[in-house]
Each structure stands twice: as C-alpha cells, then as structure tokens.
C-alpha cells in the first residue's frame, strides 16, 4: 500500500480509520464525523464499512458500541490526519474521561499506507487493531488485504472472537443519509 503519486506531484495516501461510540446517537455522530472528514480539503472518504453493534471491550460495564471503518485518501501527513480526527472529535463534543470508557465518538488512525510509526501520541498501525473484533470485522468489509503484524486483516479476523457482533446496516452507504 504505497502512496500513489498524483499528477500535481503530491502523494495520495491510503489511510484506514476506525470509528465508534456508545453515548447519545453513535451512528449519527459517526456519520457526521465521516461528512466532516469528507469535507476536509485534503481528505476524501472512499469505502466505508457496514455499521456494526459491538459489545464493549476493555471496560465491559458500559453500553454496547456502534463501530465502522472507513478508508480515506489524503495528502496529509500521519500527524496531520490524527490532528484532523481529534479536531472532529472535539467538534462533536468528545470528552476524554477514562480509558476505554463511554464516548460519543472515537476516531482512530488504524493504518497509513504501509508505514510504521511509534512516537509519543501516535502509533501506526494501531497497536491493538489485530486483537479487536470490533475493528477487524468492519475492516474486513473494505480492506481485507491489508497486512498488520505479519498477517492480513482477513487472517486476523478468522482467529478473533467476534461473539456478539451484530450487523446493523446492509452496506457501507448508511452514513450518506445520516448525520
């Protein structure tokens, strides 16, 4: 998944994002986030997974989540993509109170081309993506071929515990009419 050069000389990067939430109306918040991403001058939302309802992970004494994944193309650097995601979370009133706790919206940078980054505040690929069915199942919809930690997403998905995950939408177009 290397960057593909554009005719104007700037590189377009393929980035996978994970979106989720369990407070308020998470599907509406995720749709709004996708619209805001798509409205960014340097980001284009491409494929979006189906919408899923998933059991909580990590901190399990909370409401179930809604999750999806989205593939974007961008000319932004990895840090600028993260900044754009954090800005959208802020616009949607995300409050960071406790790790893995309830949230109105969460947008994670999962992958950026085939780049590996391990810096304060940014790790790509996302360090837990291959352990989390709530990421792997929707990512299978749009990017089963991506390789993380030596295996493809489809290989990781085959061995993950996806018990309880429910498909909510028929396809990835759910966000276009919501939000």
Image (tube, rainbow, N blue to C red):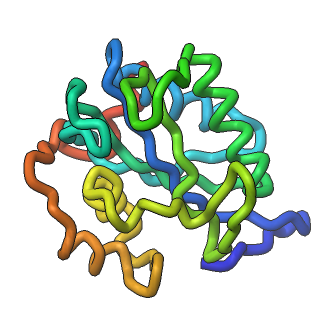
Query: Quick check: 154 left or right of 39?
Result: left
**Image location of residue 142, percent across then percent down:** 37, 61
Query: Going 45% across and 48% down the picture, which residue do you hit?
Result: 18
**Image location of residue 55, percent across then percent down:** 19, 40
Observer-nearest of 153 and 145: 153
Position of 23 relative to 45 (above/below): above
**Image location of residue 145, percent across then percent down:** 40, 78
Query: Going 35% across and 23% down the picture, which residue do you hit?
Result: 26
**Image location of residue 101, percent across then percent down:** 39, 29
Position of 100 relative to 63 (above/below): below
Residue 27 seen anywhere in this rendered image of the structure:
no
Observer-nearest of 152 and 102: 102
Query: Quick check: 42 left or right of 167?
Result: right
Query: Quick check: 97 left or right of 134?
Result: right
**Rendered image quadrant of residue 95:** top right
Query: Going 41% across and 49% down the picture, which residue do you hit?
Result: 69
């Amino acid at each position: 998944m290397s960057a593909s050069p554009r005719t104007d000389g700037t590189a377009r990067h393929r980035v996978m994002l994970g979106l989720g939430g369990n407070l308020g109306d998470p599907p509406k918040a995720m749709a709004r986030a996708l619209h805001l991403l798509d409205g960014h001058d340097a980001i284009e939302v491409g494929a979006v997974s189906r919408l899923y309802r998933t059991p909580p992970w990590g901190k399990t004494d909370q409401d179930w989540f809604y999750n999806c994944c989205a593939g974007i193309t961008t000319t932004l650097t990895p840090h600028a993509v993260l900044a754009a995601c954090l800005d959208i979370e802020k616009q949607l009133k995300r409050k960071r109170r406790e790790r893995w706790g309830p949230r109105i919206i969460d947008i994670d940078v999962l992958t950026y081309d085939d780049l590996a980054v391990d810096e304060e505040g940014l790790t790509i690929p996302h360090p837990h993506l291959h352990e989390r069915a709530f990421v792997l199942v929707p990512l299978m919809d749009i990017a089963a071929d991506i390789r993380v930690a030596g295996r493809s997403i489809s290989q990781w998905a085959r061995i993950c515990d996806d018990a309880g995950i429910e498909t909510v939408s028929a396809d990835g177009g759910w966000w276009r009419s919501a939000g």
